[in-house]
């Protein structure tokens, strides 16, 4: 089907296909065409421009979007969307004064999610995860990374990755799968951490690689979880099996994870709530994309990633939802963009760049999504009638999306 969108108030993120991401200082600029048209055919963008140049061609459908903006769908490059149950009891515990580490020591946190997931059937886990995916797609997410990590045993990790694979097969959103074997230490491996890491390296990674269940490898590199040397062992093992590193680092402490990840050519380093000058210098010398997760900072009441420090050093930045049951129980990228502006000092232009083209790069998808580019997927957000795109972060409690197109198909048609 060929569709013409006409009289677009503002067509955002119009980029040449050669642009894979936008660097720090350039992120202040958001490419835009006023009074524009856009033509899509089936699942692809085939033409766009200003209305004065709109061609006279036969199309199957004409949609007048006067007073509305069109932009690429959000690219959420860090989520844990596949989980069994929410953890609202821990939310209450935090209100009553317990912190993240105290909750974990009580048997909560990741271990809590792992126990529930291990007992969940594949069918139920899939159905719960599918509902979450449908929700975030309606909120404008067209490409998403989903991690394992709540298995903490090989059969449960495989179950999670198979759920992700089934979601990818059944939904039009582009889904990238990340294997996160080292998310926490299982209770049965207390005082036997070396054995657990050996099993990950010798058994888990080869199995996942052979089944082609993941594109990326991840580790929670943090004090009381996995240190720098342990992270190096696991990431190198993953790389030997063709898995690309995307690593949790510096959520609570700077322990040398950032220089390690840049040395290991990690595609992304995610969290970065704590960041020092040594870390900044390491990132500047690399091609690694920092990914900030403001939902997590908001929910846990911890520091926000220092976005200005990153971008003012001309380093690119992506933002993602970190959708998970413990520290970020929301995959709403519109709210992520708002937090980036209100809490991290990013301009609307910087935040949109971080949540579209840079988010796509953080999933190795910038050739397919993340911008309005001829040949890319027709993953689009059509806003309601708004005065400017700054209304998106400004109206943080409102849904300003009128329609979402994924692979050229309106979600309203489903």
Image (cartoon, rainbow, N blue to C red):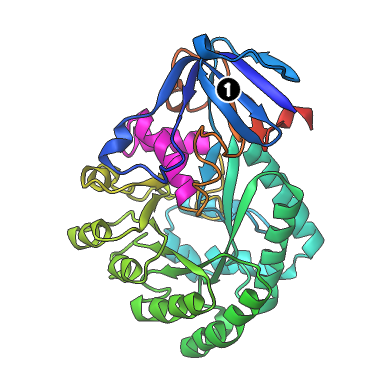
Q: Which residue is mark 1?
A: 38
Question: In front here: 223 or 239?
Answer: 239
Q: Is residue 84 left or right of residue 377?
A: right
Q: Is residue 225 left or right of residue 106?
A: left
Chain part drawn in magenta: 333-361
Farthest residue, direction right: 123
Label 1 crowd (10 A; few <14 / some 14-19 / many >=20): many
Point out residue 310 in the picture as x, y percentages from the top left corner: 26, 48
The residue positioned 71% from the left and 68% from the top of the image is 159
Point out residue 342 in the picture as x, y percentages from the top left corner: 35, 32
Farthest residue, direction left: 277
Q: Is residue 248 above or below residue 359?
A: below
Point out residue 205 in the picture as x, y percentages from the top left corner: 58, 79
Q: In which quadrant is the C terminus drawn?
A: top right
Picture quarter containing residue 250?
bottom left
Q: In which quadrant is the N terminus drawn?
A: top right
The residue positioned 56% from the left and 14% from the top of the image is 54
Secondary element type, mark 1: strand
Is-magenta flag for residue 201?
Answer: no
């Amino acid at each position: 089907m060929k569709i013409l969108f006409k009289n677009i108030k503002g067509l955002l993120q119009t980029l040449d296909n050669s642009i894979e991401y936008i660097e720090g200082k350039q992120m202040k600029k958001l490419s835009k065409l006023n009074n524009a048209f856009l033509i899509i055919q089936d699942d692809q963008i085939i033409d766009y421009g200003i209305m004065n140049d709109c061609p006279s061609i036969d199309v199957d459908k004409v949609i007048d979007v006067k007073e509305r903006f069109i932009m690429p769908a959000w690219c959420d490059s860090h989520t844990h969307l596949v989980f069994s149950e929410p953890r609202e009891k821990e939310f209450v515990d935090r209100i009553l004064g317990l912190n993240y580490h105290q909750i974990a020591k009580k048997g909560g946190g990741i271990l809590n999610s792992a126990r529930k997931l291990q007992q969940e059937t594949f069918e139920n886990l899939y159905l719960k995860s599918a509902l979450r995916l449908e929700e975030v797609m309606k909120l404008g997410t067209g490409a998403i990374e989903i991690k394992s990590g709540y298995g903490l045993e090989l059969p449960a990790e495989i179950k999670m990755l198979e759920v992700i694979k089934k979601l990818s097969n059944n939904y039009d959103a582009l889904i990238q799968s990340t294997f996160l074997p080292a998310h926490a230490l299982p209770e049965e491996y207390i005082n036997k951490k070396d054995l657990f890491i050996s099993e990950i390296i010798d058994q888990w990674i080869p199995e996942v690689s052979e089944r082609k269940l993941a594109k990326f490898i991840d580790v929670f590199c943090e004090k009381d979880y996995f240190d720098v040397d342990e992270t190096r062992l696991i990431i190198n093992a993953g790389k030997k099996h063709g898995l690309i590193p995307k690593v949790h680092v510096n959520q609570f402490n700077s322990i040398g994870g950032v220089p390690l990840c840049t040395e290991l050519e990690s595609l992304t380093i995610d969290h970065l709530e704590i960041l020092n000058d040594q870390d900044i210098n390491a990132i500047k010398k690399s091609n690694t994309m920092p990914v900030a997760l403001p939902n997590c900072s908001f929910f846990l009441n911890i520091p926000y990633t220092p976005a200005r420090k990153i971008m003012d050093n001309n380093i690119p930045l992506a933002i993602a939802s970190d959708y998970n049951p413990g520290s970020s129980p929301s995959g709403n990228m519109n709210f992520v963009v708002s937090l980036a502006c209100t809490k991290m000092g990013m301009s609307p232009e910087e935040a949109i760049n971080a949540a579209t083209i840079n988010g796509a790069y953080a999933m190795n998808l910038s050739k397919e999504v993340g911008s309005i580019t001829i040949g890319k997927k027709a993953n689009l957000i059509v806003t309601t009638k708004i005065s400017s795109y700054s209304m998106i972060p400004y109206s943080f409690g409102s849904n300003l999306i009128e329609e979402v197109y994924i692979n050229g198909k309106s979600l309203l048609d489903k």
